Each structure stands twice: as structure tokens, then as C-alpha cells.
Image (spheres, rainbow, N blue to C red):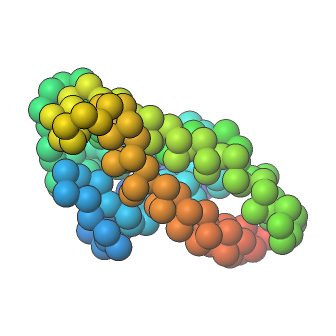
Amino acid sequence: MEKRRIRLLAEMGVAVALAAVFNFITLFRMPQGGSVNLEMLPILVVALRWGGIPGIITGLVYGLVQLALDPYVVHPFQFLLDYPLAYMMVGIAGFFRLRNMREGGIKLYLHVLPGILLAGFGRFLAHFLTGVIFFSEFAPEGQKVWLYSAIYNGTYILPSILIAYIIIIPILRRLFKNEGL
């Protein structure tokens, strides 16, 4: 039991570090913040391996690390939405956690899809609300603020979700294979 707990804590720490590194390796960076990258992937791996609570805690810690590395805060509530809450939402994928990897092919992809979509939507929702509440001045003249925020945040979050979804299955298979599950 103790060995398992140590392994969980180690994986959470490595996931936070990898997410921070992946945040700096971007495919595309938006002008007012946000980018297409793999930062959600390590949090999703922890969540789908260990469950929702470890995933949420990993997301919380990563959100605070990201705040330390690349902060942009205009209001305390915006800080909560954009940093800890947005990445805690990524961890909710763990409520769809995998018990084993014996399922193969399309069945496995379909099993993790709802969790990853929910996690991505949760992160999107946090950033969307921030955009509507705190960054309405960036919306073009005549465009609804909610539409602007949805388009802006969807532009980088949707591709990030898709990339993570494609990459995560081989990673999870390898991790579970090494444990004989």
C-alpha cells in the first residue's frame, strides 16, 4: 500500500513537471494567452490511471506552478478560474479512470473519450467565463462577448484536446503493460 502511494505521488510530481515543460513547447500561441500544446496530457494520464481526486490535485498543483511561471492576473476571481480551477477540471477525466487495458482497439478509445471531452470542456468553461467576465474589451466591435470568448478559447483548447486524445492511448497501454494490468 505504501509503495503504491509513493508511486502515485511521484507520478503526480513528474506529471506537473512535464505539463510545465509542455506549456513552453507550443504549436500555436494565441495573442492574449492560451496555446495549442500538450500541457493537459500528463494531467490526463494521472487522472485516467489513478482516478479523479489524484487528477484534480495534479491539475491544482500544475495550475499554481503555471501561475508562478507565466502569470497574467487582473482579478482574484480571474486567477482562480484561469489557473487552479481550469486545470483541476482536466483532472475530472479521472472519474472515467481505466481499471485495466485489456480492452483493445476502438473500445479503448471510446472508453476514455467521455472523460477527456468532459475534462476539456471543463477547462474551456473556466477560460470562457474568464473571457466573458474580465476580457470583454478584446471582443471586436459589434460581436457578442460570449461568442468572442467561445471562439477565442475554442481555437486553442479544441486542438489541444484532440492531440491529447490521439497521443494518450499508446501512453496508457505502455504504463499498464509495465504493471501487468
Viewer-nearest residue: 132 or 79 = 132
Q: Is residue 180 above or below residue 127?
A: below
User: How many marks are shown on the rendered structure?
Assistant: 0
Question: Residue sitting at 60 percent across and 41 percent down?
Answer: 118
Q: Which residue is at a point 67% across and 75% down the rendered structure image?
A: 170
Q: At 53% across and 67% down in the image, what residue appears?
A: 163
The residue closer to the viewer here, 84 or 30, is 30
Q: Is residue 171 visible?
A: yes
Viewed as shown, does residue 143 lie left or right of 113? left
Residue 132 against residue 177 in the figure, above or below: above
Q: Position of residue 78 (x, y in %)?
A: 24, 30
Which image quarter: residue 60? top left
Asked whether residue 10 appears in the rendered view, the answer is no
- In the figure, is residue 155 to the left or right of 90? left
Q: Nearer the viewer, residue 71 or 35?
A: 35
x%, y% of residue 164?
54, 64
x then y, percent, for residue 58: 44, 46
Q: Which image quarter: residue 106? A: bottom right
Residue 127 sits above or below residue 129 on the image: below
Residue 104 or 26: which is nearer the viewer?
Answer: 26
- Image location (x, y in percent) of residue 44: 55, 54
For the point 15% across and 27% down, the residue is: 75
Q: Quadrant of the C terminus?
A: bottom right
Report the side of 46 relative to 155 (left or right).
Answer: right
Above-or-below relation of 174 to 96: below
